[in-house]
Image: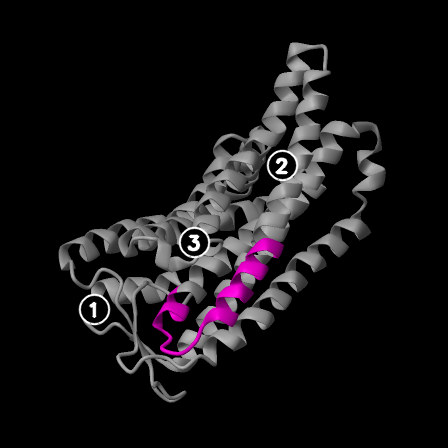
Amino acid sequence: MVSHCDGFILLGFSDNPRLEMTLFMAVSVFYTVTLVGNTTIILLSHLDPHLHTPMYFFLTHLSILDLCFTTSCIPQMLMNFWSSDKTISYLGCAVQLYIFLGLGASECVLLLVMAFDRYVAVCRPLHYGVIMHPPLCHKLAFLVWASGVFGTLVQSPTTMKLSFCHHHQVDDFVCEVPALIRLACGDTHVNELQISVIGAIFLMGPLLLILVSYGRITQAVLAIQSQNGRSKAFHTCSSHLAVVFLFYCSVTAVYIQPRSHFSQKGGKFLTLFYTVVTPTLNPLIYTLRNKDMKRAFRRLLGKYRMSSEE
């Protein structure tokens, strides 16, 4: 059994060094785009008064979550890809697990809050300003972060208290719950039940409510008479729906079913997808498809040119 002083070995694709070097270059590019894209969204939403709306308030929180989420695991992942030393200390693994799980739970709730915002915008447009007032937005943001703290404090301690096998080898890139449960040598039925319950609360529950809200949104959009109105309403929601699809498809596949049902490599690629690819695509989806963001970026560039000319 492993003591709390020992570390773990994150195997990743250690049996395929060539693939690891390819992944190192790919993940480096994705992480750079994630940092630049999400930082740009945060700055634009803060600096441009036109973006001081509930939608961009929650989008800023999504960008902060994605920055923290990726930074909690990708630097360690890159070190493992580059180096033959793939160890991580027990404390480092525990910290990564707490942060990783907490931010993941927060993102599930945040996507639900953003779906509620879009529902009010499309289905109750005349009352949008009254319903989505700043105090409510701040309370919802607090709920998002508090839910992450609750989720990780329920699941992480019991996971780290498991009796781990003597080889210490975690067959994954990060210290996440399914991989650590698979490493345990003792009885894990309680942990597996716990992860199923937490998954139902933070994954399936929000996803069901998101689908219900988009069902109502679809009814409201179809009731709009003008084609231009329908197109505008659809465009308002399509970016968020794309982000929901990308995030939930990969995370649900890993956390709802026991990890042993997956091929090990398939599970690793799913982990790569929701830790690396999805946080990179989020800012691209919201900036490349968003006219308000493009206008805000042009205005910021215009102010910078004017100040440099002076």
Disc 3 marks which amino acid? Val
Residue farthest along the top direction in this orientation: 226
Q: Nearer the viewer, residue 47 or 79?
A: 79
Q: Nearer the viewer, mark 1 or mark 2?
A: 2
Q: Is residue 223 above or below residue 7?
A: above
What residue sits right under mark 3 in the picture?
A: 254
Residue 250 falls inside the magenta stretch: no
Compared across the picture, whether 124 is left or right of 278 comes to right
- Labels 1 and 3: the sequence-earlier one: 1
Q: Nearer the viewer, residue 282 or 15?
A: 15
The structure residue drawn at horizontal position 76% and vertical position 56%, both measured from the top left corner, is 139
The structure residue drawn at horizontal position 58% and vertical position 44%, both measured from the top left corner, is 44
Task: Read off the magenta span.
Answer: 179-201
- Labels 1 and 2: the sequence-earlier one: 1
What residue sits right under mark 1 in the picture?
A: 83
What residue sits right under mark 2 in the picture?
A: 211
The picture places residue 92, in percent across and down from the top left corner, at: 41, 77
The structure residue drawn at horizontal position 65% and vertical position 11%, both measured from the top left corner, is 227
- The answer, for residue 202, to whether it is visible in the render is yes
The picture places residue 190, in percent across and down from the top left corner, at: 52, 71
The structure residue drawn at horizontal position 53% and vertical position 59%, both measured from the top left corner, is 196
Q: Are marks 1 and 2 in contact (CB under 8 Å)?
A: no
Compared across the picture, whether 194 is left or right of 134 comes to left
